[in-house]
Amino acid sequence: MNKSKKPWPTLPSDDAAEAFVAEADLSEYDWSLAEPVRYEFEDKSARLNMRLPESQLAAIKAEAEKRGMKYQRFIRELLDRGMQTLR
């Protein structure tokens, strides 16, 4: 991390993130670990229905909660990461 830049705060929700971005001077923060999140800004009109073990869904929900995000969003992130490894 760049010593002259502030570390990014942990934001517990989308509302907290929106408030932070609205008020903060983003040039003061360290961008060296930033990752693009293209999929979150696209229209989510497609649906996916799949079966998986309850224990797996419970683990996904628990991890998403630890990260302060909705589990569907976390699943989209996991899918995107998986697709990146195929390239």
Image (tube, rainbow, N blue to C red):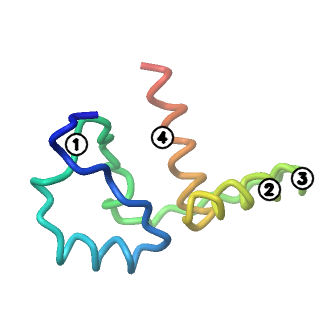
Dot 3 or dot 1: first in sequence order is 1
| Residue 62 to residue 34: above or below | below
Q: Secondary structure at mark 4?
A: helix
Q: Nearer the viewer, mark 2 or mark 1?
A: 1
Identify the secondary structure beneath mark 2: helix
**Compared to 41, does 80 lie above or below?**
above
The residue lying at 72 percent from left, 61 percent from top is 61
* CB atoms of marks 3 and 1 within 8 Å: no
Q: Which mark is residue 80?
A: 4
Q: Residues within 10 Å of mark 4 (few under 14, many from 20)?
A: some
Q: CA distance from mark 1 to mark 4?
A: 21 Å
Q: Residue at x 58, y 67 (%)?
A: 70
* Sequence-first tag of 4 and 2: 2
- Residue type marked 2: Leu
Q: Quadrant of residue 21?
A: bottom left
| Mark carried by residue 57 | 2
Say which label, 3 or 4, has the lower sequence index. 3
Disc 4/disc 2 C-alpha distance (Å) = 18 Å
Question: Which residue is found at the position 72% from the left and 53% from the top?
Answer: 60
Of residues 71 and 53, the one drawn nearer to the viewer in this rendering: 71
Residue 40 x, y percent position in the rendering: 38, 58
Q: Is residue 41 left or right of residue 25?
A: right
Mark 1: amino acid? Trp
Q: Are marks 3 and 2 in contact (CB under 8 Å)?
A: yes
Place of residue 49 in the rendered image (x, y in percent of width and height, measured from the top left) = 70, 59
From the image, state whether disc 3 or disc 4 is nearer to you.
3
Q: Secondary structure at mark 3?
A: helix
User: Residue 55, which numbered label?
Assistant: 3
Q: Which residue is mark 1?
A: 31
Mark 3–mark 2 Cα distance, whole angstroms, equals 6 Å
Mark 4 and mark 2 in contact? Answer it, CB < 8 Å. no
